[in-house]
Image (cartoon, helix red, strand yellow):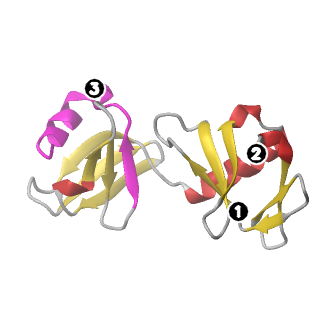
Amino acid sequence: MSSANFKLTRNQAGALVFTSHTGEAHEGVVPVRAFPIAAPDEGLSLVSKDGHELAWIARLDDLPDDTRALIEEELAQREFMPEIRRINRVSSFATPSIWQVETDRGATDLVLKSEDYIRRLAQTALLIADSQGVYFLVRDIDKLDSHSRKLLDRFL
C-alpha cells in the first residue's frame, strides 16, 4: 500500500490509528524501521497490534508533513539509543564491568555484563547493551579518541 493511500492519526489515548483507503481502521499501530542504524529514514513499516504490516514506506521524506511528524514522534518515544562519543573509564577489563561514558545525551554509566553484549553492526559500528537493556550505539569506532578506542579494544 503506498503512503498516499492511508491516513494516520492519534486516538484519545494517544495511540496511532491507521485508516486505510477503504476506511478500515487499526488502533495501536507501531512504526518499525527496516534499517534503524544504516538508513533510519528509509524502509519503514506500519504494523498492526497483531504484527501484520499495514503499509510500507520507502522514505519518510515522501510522506505529508503531518503524517511524518506523527511517525517521528512515535519512533522517538520507542527508540532510545544514546550514541557513545567517548569512553572515560572502565572499572575492570573483566566482565561485568562499569563503563563511564559520554553520549550525545550526556554522561552516564553502563554495566556491561559480558563481551557478548557488544555486537558489531558494520565494520566500524557497534551496538552495546547494558545490564538494564538500554542499547548504546558507537556509530564509528574510528572517530572515537585514542583513549576510548584503547579501552574498547580490550573488549573486542
User: Image quarter for residue 49?
Assistant: bottom right
For residue 14, side relative to residue 104 (left or right): right
What separation in Å lies between label 1 and label 2 (alpha carbons)? 15 Å
Taking the spot 79% from the left edge, 73% from the top edge, the residue there is 13
Few, some or many residues within 10 Å of mark 1 (<14, 14–19, 20+): many
Question: Which residue is tagged 3?
Answer: 142
What SS does tag 3 mark?
helix
Numbered circle sitting on residue 88: none
- Under mark 1, the amino acid is Val
Q: Residue furthest top?
A: 142
Residue 29, label in figure: 1
Which label lies toward us, 1 or 2? 2
The CA span between labels 1 and 3 is 38 Å
Residue type, numbered disc 2: Met
Residue labelled with disc 2: 1
Name the mark nearer the viewer: 2 or 3: 2
How far across and how far down the image is residue 22, in percent? Answer: 90, 56
State the SS at label 1.
Answer: loop
- From the image, state whether disc 1 or disc 3 is nearer to you: 1
- Spatial separation of the CA atoms under disc 2 and disc 3: 40 Å
Foreground residue, 111 or 137? 137
- Along the line of sight, which residue is nearer the eye, 64 or 105? 64
Q: Amino acid at mark 3?
A: Asp
Q: Check disc 3: other Cα within 10 Å, few if <14, some if 14-19, many if 20+.
A: few
- Magenta region, residue range: 134-156
Nearer to me, 153 or 15: 15
Say whether residue 135 is magenta.
Answer: yes
Q: How many marks?
A: 3
